[in-house]
Amino acid sequence: MARTTQQTSRTETSSTSVPTPLPQLIDVAALAEHLGVKVRHVRRLVHERRIPFIKWGHLVRFDPDQVNAWLEGCRIEPHPPRPG
């Protein structure tokens, strides 16, 4: 009887849960165009592991949200003006 209850609760949980939408991933060429750099530069960033990427088999893809967060982390704010 406990086994049946366990199976029922799993079914109820899976039927009420909403699947999480997958992010739209972009490829190397699209990211290079977005950043205004050459494809070779993006591939070098991937090789040096300086940019977040997803490797699926031989494919390299990027999550735009992760890339935007990475860019924000690279931002250098200007110094405040010196009192004068």
Image (spheres, grey):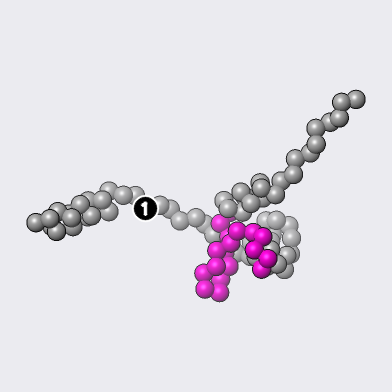
**Figure check: 52 above or below 78:** below
Coordinates of residue 12 in the picture (x, y in percent): 22, 51
Locate the N terminus and report the quarter of the image it occupies. bottom left
Is residue 39 in view from this perspective?
no
> For the C terminus, which image quadrant?
top right
Point out residue 52 in the picture as x, y percentages from the top left corner. Answer: 60, 58
Residue that carries the numbered disc 1 in the rendered image = 19
Q: Is residue 40 left or right of residue 17?
A: right
Q: Give the left or right position of residue 42, taking residue 6 as reference.
A: right
Residue 32 located left or right of residue 81:
left
Q: Residue furthest left?
A: 1
Q: Residue furthest top?
A: 84
Amino acid found under the numbered disc labelled 1: Pro
Name the residue rendered at 73%, 57% in the picture. 36
Start and end of the magenta stretch? Answer: 47-64
Q: Report the number of numbered marks.
A: 1
Instruction: Identify the residue shown where x is 60% and y is 64%.
Output: 27
Write the residue at 27% across / 48% down. Answer: 16
Residue 25 location (% of width, % of height):
54, 59
State whether residue 67 appears in this view. yes
Q: Position of residue 47 (x, y in %)?
A: 66, 68
Of 72 and 6, which appears nearest the observer? 6
Residue name at image x 57 percent, y 51 percent = 65
Q: Quadrant of residue 2?
A: bottom left
Membership of 61 in magenta stretch: yes
